[in-house]
Amino acid sequence: MSDSSARRLDAAYATCERIMTHAARNFSYGIRLLPPEKRRALSAVYALARRIDDIGDGDLSDHEKLRLLDDVRNSIKRLGEPTDDPVFIALADAASKLPIPTEAFFELIEGCELDVRQTRYPSFPDLVHYCRCVAGSIGRLSIGVFEPGDMAAAEPLADSLGIALQLTNILRDIREDLRRGRIYLPLDELEAAGIELRLDPSGNVADDGRLGDFLRDQAVRAEKWYARGLALLPMLDHRSAACVGAMAGIYHRILARIAKNPTSVLRERVSLPPWEKTLLALRALTGGRP
């Protein structure tokens, strides 16, 4: 590789790392525990995932969002061809060195298209499909960076952990999502519980007293997905396990807080202070259980 090509590649990775540092927040606590080459590769994966998410969550018309998502899909199909886009330059390099299953980005795009169309989920299996698209895909992409000894065994565990994190997001963001017209909780279960998700005049989620138990039950179910997904950690090298443990640990702690006080999410976004995230990352680095 010529000096100019090397500088161009370094600049592309630097762009991805800036995107990750600026936007990743919870994920950044784990990603920074990786060695430089894996950190750079994961930053490229994250930068493209962030671009896809930003399209789906942006302010453009639905028609324009779908067009842009299709443009990204076509760009992924051309991965490795000459381009001036730093994210695709970095991702192509990472995918040439590591077994990153870049086709999983197509599932992420599918999930974002479901969001654009404000798709509702009739049952929990339908919701799991959505979670697998938007979060399980990231788990499988990340496994390509971590390179476990048994990829076939590790991928479904990474998928399960991604689903656990997304179920946590859905509970945490119930108020924000409802304000945007999005409902992710299974419609058949809401109906069976006699619950209609709606906003009250103050912009919070209306509660007639039934939501607390319902959300606690959803948190218990998410906990089962963590139990499956965290079986991935012993399959990874120390630094990769620390990365995953830190990221999962932050979301796992958020889920625990929701389970303890489920109606809190109806009024506010449950989060952890930076000191607690740092403590969880240090615990993961020393081999503590998330």
Image: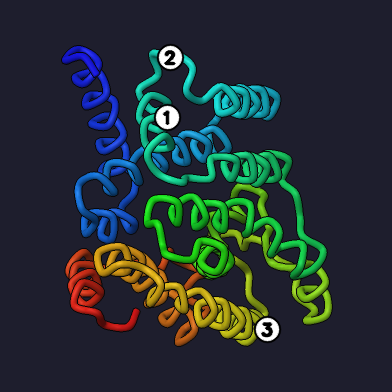
Q: Residue flagged by tag 2: what amino acid is it?
A: Thr
Q: Residue flagged by tag 3: what amino acid is it?
A: Arg
Residue 139 visible, this orientation: yes
Q: Which residue has dot 2 on it?
A: 83
Q: Which residue has dot 3 on it?
A: 210
Q: Which residue has dot 1 on it?
A: 92
Tell which tag, 3 or 1, sits nearer the viewer: 1
Tell which tag, 3 or 2, sits nearer the viewer: 2
| Position of 223 relative to 20 (above/below) | below
- Mark 3 is surrounded, within 10 Å at the Cα level, by few (under 14), some (14 to 19) or many (20 or more) other residues, namely few
| Position of 76 relative to 259 (above/below) | above
- Mark 2 is surrounded, within 10 Å at the Cα level, by few (under 14), some (14 to 19) or many (20 or more) other residues, namely few
Quadrant in which residue 177 is drawn:
bottom right
Residue 146: x, y in percent?
A: 37, 57
Towards the viewer: 229 or 194:
229
* For the residues bearing labels 2 and 1, Cβ distance under 8 angstroms: yes
Residue located 61% across and 81% down the image: 221
Mark 3 secondary-structure assignment: loop
Q: Which of marks 3 and 1 is nearer the N terminus?
A: 1
Residue located 63% across and 85% down the image: 217
Q: Is residue 85 left or right of residue 67?
A: left
Q: Which of marks 2 and 1 is nearer the N terminus?
A: 2
Q: Residue flagged by tag 1: what amino acid is it?
A: Ala
Residue 73: x, y in percent?
A: 61, 29
Quadrant in which residue 27 is drawn:
bottom left
Residue 226: x, y in percent?
A: 50, 77
Residues at marks 2 and 1, CA–CA distance in whole angstroms: 10 Å
* For the residues bearing labels 3 and 2, Cβ distance under 8 angstroms: no
Q: Which of marks 3 and 2 is nearer the N terminus?
A: 2
